[in-house]
């Protein structure tokens, strides 16, 4: 099934992994700058880079130096950059209603997109559809005009508690799954390495390697939609947690205790602030059970008091939850993303006010940044987890 046989990266040492990571996430970048940022000698950088260039994963692009060049006026510099077409990756975002798949190159640049509707969330039915979805994505790669490298693996992103080390979805309330061995089941149908991740953590990996995390020392990614998730990048790494659970902002007990969450617990932030909770509240208070989310947003924009109150309540709880998270881990910036940002302006003022009220001291200096994400971006996040595992030789992509 792979386009070409999977080939390992020629990285024999941790220094080699660090050098390639810098080139991948910060390139084009000269050797001297890699040495400065990694605190390796230039000789060590050259030794690590040589086999990557020889095998076609990295290229050396000579260009004239400008006046600010660190290697001297008038001398040529040789920035290193990853060859995007040296590797291909598949990433799939799984929701209760659809499969969103992408193929990407080595830099997580999207090559192809494939969407399919799901009408059955039973694990075996979904895995069968996943296998066919993968075959369709591979077919698109084979027939595409872009040059595609060997397939490194498949990334699957799903909401909930995911045991990434074993590829098991332990608990996904949105999917209605408990203890589903996704990697094992899908591996019986397709012969490629499979990385299964929590969807928010996968999106955080993409931001870490190819987005805001490239320039930030620390950040949090908060996603607002049918659920509320949070990914954390602290001290140079995406936080996974000792048990594979971390950043569960949506399940902080900051909402009224009489409200029951989809997880079965009471008072979770999601019971007030998720898109589904906001819509349910507006339906109940207006008596309009036929309302969809777009109609509820229109009502709020038109000044309907019940609709406005629902969004205000959501903003209050989200702001308090953000402050609690920032007080605990102190990120430099919080990126707010997800499908729920469509109604962001309806609760932004209340959210920022609640955040300011509850953030302690200098934690209030944390920047809150809005970034729109599509479902294709979530699938790209799944692909990014494969790229990271491939570079680091993490299971199931060990060398």
Image (tube, rainbow, N blue to C red):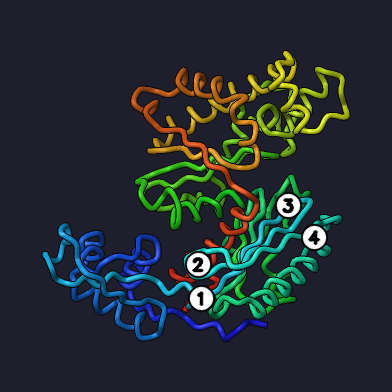
Q: CA distance from mark 4 to mark 1?
A: 30 Å
Q: CA distance from mark 4 to mark 3?
A: 12 Å
Residue 91: x and y in percent read: 62, 64
Q: Are marks 1 and 2 in contact (CB under 8 Å)?
A: yes
The secondary structure type at the circle numbered 1 is loop
Q: Residues within 10 Å of mark 2 (few under 14, many from 20)?
A: many
Residue named by callout 4:
123
Q: Is 241 rendered above or below residue 252?
A: below
| Numbered disc in front, either 4 or 2 | 2
| Disc nearer the start of the sequence (4/3) | 3
| Disc nearer the start of the sequence (1/2) | 1
Q: CA distance from mark 1 to mark 2?
A: 9 Å
Q: Which mark is residue 95?
A: 3
| Numbered disc in front, either 4 or 3 | 3
Quadrant housing the N terminus: bottom right
The secondary structure type at the circle numbered 4 is helix
């Amino acid at each position: 099934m792979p386009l070409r046989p999977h080939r390992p990266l020629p990285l024999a040492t941790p220094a080699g992994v660090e050098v390639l990571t810098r080139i991948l996430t910060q390139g084009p970048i000269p050797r001297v700058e890699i040495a400065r940022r990694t605190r390796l000698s230039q000789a060590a950088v050259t030794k690590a880079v040589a086999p990557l260039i020889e095998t076609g994963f990295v290229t050396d692009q000579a260009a004239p130096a400008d006046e600010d060049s660190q290697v001297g006026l008038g001398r040529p510099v040789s920035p290193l950059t990853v060859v995007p077409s040296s590797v291909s990756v598949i990433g799939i975002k799984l929701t209760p209603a659809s499969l969103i798949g992408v193929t990407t190159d080595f830099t997580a640049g999207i090559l192809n997109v494939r969407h399919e509707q799901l009408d059955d969330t039973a694990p075996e039915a979904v895995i069968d559809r996943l296998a066919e979805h993968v075959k369709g994505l591979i077919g698109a790669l084979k027939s595409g005009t872009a040059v595609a490298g060997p397939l490194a693996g498949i990334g699957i992103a799903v909401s909930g508690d995911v045991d990434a080390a074993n590829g098991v979805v332990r608990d996904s309330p949105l999917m209605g799954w408990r203890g589903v061995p996704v990697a094992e089941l899908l591996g019986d149908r397709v012969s490629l390495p499979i990385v299964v991740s929590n969807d928010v953590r996968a999106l955080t990996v993409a931001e870490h390697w190819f987005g805001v995390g490239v320039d930030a020392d620390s950040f949090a990614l908060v996603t607002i939609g049918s659920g509320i998730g949070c990914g954390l990048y602290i001290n140079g790494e995406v936080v996974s947690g000792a048990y594979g659970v971390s950043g569960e902002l949506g399940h902080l007990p900051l909402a009224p205790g009489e409200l029951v969450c989809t997880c079965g617990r009471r008072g979770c932030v999601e019971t007030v602030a998720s898109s589904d909770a906001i819509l349910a509240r507006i339906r109940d208070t207006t008596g309009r059970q036929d309302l969809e989310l777009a109609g509820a947003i229109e009502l709020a924009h038109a000044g309907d008091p019940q609709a406005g109150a629902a969004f205000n309540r959501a903003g209050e709880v989200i702001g308090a939850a953000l402050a609690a998270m920032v007080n605990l881990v102190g990120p430099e910036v919080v990126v707010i993303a997800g499908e729920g940002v469509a109604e962001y302006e309806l609760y932004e003022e209340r959210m920022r006010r609640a955040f300011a009220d509850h953030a302690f001291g200098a934690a209030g200096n944390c920047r809150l940044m809005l970034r729109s994400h599509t479902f294709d971006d979530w699938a790209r996040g799944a692909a990014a987890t494969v790229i990271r595992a491939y570079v680091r030789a993490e299971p199931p992509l060990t060398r």
